[in-house]
């Protein structure tokens, strides 16, 4: 059972009963209220983690309840359900502090998926975790020296509204850090809108980011708010920003400078109050020097820089992460977490993990699903991990070229011959790696 305590507020008995039935099987405490006044009394009497409220009620609207909750219980997660869904209504709700907006009719699966996302936000806000592992801000797992440095930077970034640039290899947890910054700030109840710049086709990027008005182009049957308007009052997270075209970079620079957006088809600017958090796995400074990224935009983004270390540099964190992921996925499957004997742990810790924490998490999930015993043995691991070479023995009588040759060879083996991944780990480009090979 999930530990979140949920209050459902709806004036329709049938809807309350349906929501109660859906949620009771998944969450430890679910209570219902028929109106805003009853909900306010219940909130004063006992603690809740999440409030699900209808938008329209005869005695006090859902928006009024949202204002009350945000003014008195800042850590509570808010979900609004409505049969009168509009883009403008969703934007207004999120500006007031609603974190999940669910239009009717919805399925049980859609409800539980939205609630799962909201529960994660609440846990991050409270810095809690179901795994019990040592954590940093917002439940980030890790206790190494390099991660403690990251935690200090997150704390500093959370105190201001300055633009943040998060850098690091793929899979190091850049979005998790962005969420920690947002939910650790005094604006934690405002929207956090993540945008994967590489996943949006170039021809749709402007309309997705800035929105459009009705009739702006063929197919624009209604006006639509963009991601920047949705994030108004909160934070927008621009992941993989290096994949944005130079033309879009120019428009983004103007938005950051002027704090206003132009919807496609409109000549009237719309002011936005947002914090921009960007992330990339590339060296933006070098990219800017080569003309692949606007230099002025780089300086606008690089006000505060948080560099995430790769997993191989996080001494002491590997076992914490392995056991934490194992417990998490075991709970999802309703089984006990398996043991990881020392020989299995040694193999996992000895692997280079070019995909970083994301690769490790996926691997542990696979092991939990596939393992048929209460212990994960070396034979359960993939062949490329079992057959990796033992760590190199360092000695003072080896020349620099010998050490370099051995290290390059080991990294290539750990990456399964993937030159791009090996080059990222070595901190060189593919041409230099080919030369060394």
Image (cartoon, helix red, strand yellow):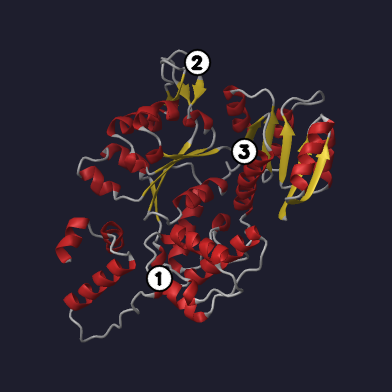
On the image, the x and y values in percent for residue 434 come to: 17, 61
Residue 221: which disc? 2
How far apart are the two marked residues, 3 and 2, measured between alpha carbons?
A: 27 Å
Residue holding disc 1: 383
Q: Are marks 2 and 1 in contact (CB under 8 Å)?
A: no
Label 1 neighbour load within 10 Å: few <14, some 14-19, many 20+: few
**Disc 1 to disc 3, how far (Cα)?**
43 Å
Image quadrant where one finds the N terminus: bottom right
Q: Name the N-terminal-most of marks 2 and 1.
A: 2
User: Is 90 on the left-hand or right-hand side of 354?
Assistant: right
Closer to the camera in the image, 67 or 331: 331
Q: Which numbered dot is residue 99?
A: 3
Where residue 117 appears, as percent x and y from the top left, is 60, 45
Question: Which of pointers 3 and 2 indicates the residue nearer the eye?
Answer: 2
Q: Residues within 10 Å of mark 2 (few under 14, many from 20)?
A: few
Disc 2 from disc 1: Cα separation:
54 Å
Relative to 246, is 23 above or below? below
In the image, residue 209 lies at what x, y percent? 43, 30
- Secondary structure of the residue carrying tag 3 is loop
């Amino acid at each position: 059972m999930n530990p979140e305590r949920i209050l459902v507020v709806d004036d329709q008995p049938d809807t309350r009963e349906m929501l109660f039935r859906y949620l009771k099987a998944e969450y430890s405490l679910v209570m219902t209220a028929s109106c805003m006044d009853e909900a306010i009394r219940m909130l004063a009497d006992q603690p809740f983690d999440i409030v699900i409220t209808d938008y329209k009620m005869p005695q006090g609207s859902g928006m009024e309840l949202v204002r009350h909750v945000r003014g008195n219980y800042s850590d509570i997660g808010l979900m609004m359900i409505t049969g009168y869904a509009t883009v403008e209504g969703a934007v207004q709700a999120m500006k007031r502090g609603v974190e999940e907006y669910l239009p009717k009719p919805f399925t049980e699966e859609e409800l539980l998926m939205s609630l799962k996302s909201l529960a994660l936000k609440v846990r991050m806000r409270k810095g809690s975790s179901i795994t019990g592992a040592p954590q940093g801000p917002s439940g980030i797992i890790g206790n190494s020296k390099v991660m403690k440095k990251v935690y200090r930077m997150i704390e500093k970034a959370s105190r201001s509204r300055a633009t943040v640039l998060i850098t690091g290899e793929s899979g190091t947890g850049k979005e998790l850090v962005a969420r920690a910054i947002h939910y650790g700030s005094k604006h934690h109840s405002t929207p956090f809108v993540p945008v994967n710049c590489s996943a949006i086709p170039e021809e749709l990027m402007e309309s997705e980011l800035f929105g459009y008005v009705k009739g702006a182009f063929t197919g624009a049957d209604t006006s639509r708010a963009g991601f920047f308007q949705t994030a108004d009052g909160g934070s927008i997270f621009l992941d993989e920003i290096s994949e944005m075209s130079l033309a879009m970079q120019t428009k983004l620079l103007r938005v950051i400078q002027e704090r206003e957006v132009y919807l496609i088809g409109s000549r009237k600017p719309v002011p936005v109050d947002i914090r921009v958090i960007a992330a990339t796995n590339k060296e933006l400074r070098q990219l800017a020097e080569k003309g692949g990224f606007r230099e002025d935009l780089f300086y606008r983004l690089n006000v505060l820089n948080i560099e995430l270390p790769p997993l191989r540099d996080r001494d002491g964190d590997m076992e914490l992460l392995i056991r934490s992921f194992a417990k998490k996925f075991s709970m999802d499957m309703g089984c006990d977490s398996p043991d990881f004997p020392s020989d299995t742990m040694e193999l996992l810790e000895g692997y280079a993990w070019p995909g970083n924490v994301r690769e490790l998490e996926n691997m542990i999930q696979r092991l939990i699903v596939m393992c048929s015993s209460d212990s994960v043995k070396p034979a359960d691991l993939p062949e490329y991990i079992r057959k990796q070479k033992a760590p190199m023995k360092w000695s003072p009588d080896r020349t620099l070229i010998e050490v370099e040759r051995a290290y390059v060879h080991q990294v290539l083996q750990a990456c399964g011959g993937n030159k791009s991944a090996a080059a990222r780990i070595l901190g060189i480009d593919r041409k230099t790696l080919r030369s060394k090979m």
